[in-house]
Image (tube, helix red, strand yellow):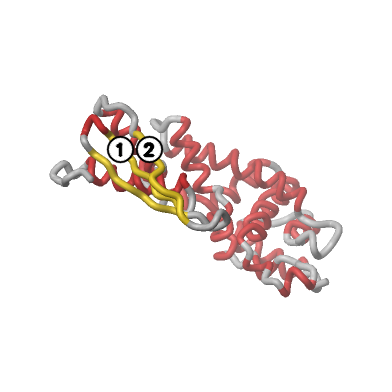
């Protein structure tokens, strides 16, 4: 087992990076303990922190985008609280270097694993919730996610190409596009798909390829969107 980080080393860092002073230092230690290191690990705190993060981010988005609909808010929240997003925030604050691991997990690079970083970040939020209540935990979440929220792309950019294409066609009173599987290549465990997206009413079509049918459809839709907004280009 890797030696535990002493509270006297963790607490000043948490205060600096997260803006919270723990009344119960043991919570901070538990929040930074992976299940491979000890029986008293951070998974229960991560469970709490996940709920707090989702709730606070929903409120932040509700306040920031008063005219956005439920679907748009949900897509933006999914972007902000994704494992990759939370892991990036955790890495920027040095969370990985302070998580306690068992020897095997430490040797395998656990401190760089996105899922572990994201879970540890949520565990810290959960620990703050237990230590000082919802308002204190919410303040931490706002501190961590205010900048990522401000940097979010426009709502429309978060929609997948198939959704954007369908909405663009609906806005023109045109029927939904048709997707046709053209070819499937490769061995069963390593297939490659080719799909053609067509809008017969406009005489437009485009093809896409990918390692899954869904990915091929999305690429085909993306290319057809480009043609839709460039009427001088010849359909294929």
| Residue at x 54% of width, y 60% of height | 88
| Residue at x 81% of width, y 65% of height | 37
Residue 147 seen in this snapshot? no
Q: Is residue 183 left or right of residue 23?
A: left
For the image, the number of numbered tags is 2
| Residue at x 50% of width, y 47% of height | 79
- Residues at marks 1 and 2, CA–CA distance in whole angstroms: 6 Å
- The part of the image, by quadrant, that contains residue 121 is bottom right
Question: Which residue matches tag 2?
Answer: 179
- The part of the image, by quadrant, that contains residue 115 is bottom right
Near-viewer residue (25 or 203): 203
Question: Which residue matches tag 1?
Answer: 198
In the image, residue 225 above or below residue 16: above
Task: Give the crowd class for mark 1: few <14, some 14-19, many >=20 residues within 10 Å.
Answer: many
In the image, residue 73 above or below residue 88: above
| Residue at x 64% of width, y 46% of height | 137
Marks 1 and 2 in Cβ contact (< 8 Å): yes
Location of the N terminus by quadrant is bottom right
């Amino acid at each position: 087992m890797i030696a535990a980080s002493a509270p006297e080393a963790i607490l000043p860092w948490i205060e600096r990076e997260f803006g919270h002073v723990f009344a119960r230092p043991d919570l901070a230690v538990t929040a930074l303990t992976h299940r491979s290191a000890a029986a008293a690990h951070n998974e229960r705190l991560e469970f709490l922190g996940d709920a707090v993060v989702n709730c606070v981010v929903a409120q932040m988005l509700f306040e920031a985008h008063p005219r956005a609909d439920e679907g748009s808010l949900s897509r933006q929240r999914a972007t902000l609280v994704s494992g990759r997003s939370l892991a990036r925030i955790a890495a920027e604050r040095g969370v990985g270097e302070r998580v306690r691991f068992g020897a095997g997990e430490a040797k395998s690079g656990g401190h760089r694993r996105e899922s572990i970083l994201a879970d540890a970040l949520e565990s810290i939020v959960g620990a703050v919730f237990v230590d000082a209540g919802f308002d204190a935990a919410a303040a931490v979440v706002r501190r961590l996610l205010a900048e990522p929220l401000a940097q979010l792309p426009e709502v429309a950019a978060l929609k997948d190409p198939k959704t954007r294409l369908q909405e663009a066609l609906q806005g023109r009173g045109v029927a939904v596009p048709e997707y046709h599987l053209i070819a499937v290549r490769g061995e069963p465990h390593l297939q490659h798909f080719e799909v053609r997206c067509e809008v017969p009413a406009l005489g437009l079509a485009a093809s896409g390829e990918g390692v899954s049918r869904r990915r091929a459809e999305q690429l085909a839709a993306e290319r057809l969107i480009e043609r839709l907004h460039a009427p001088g280009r010849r359909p294929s």
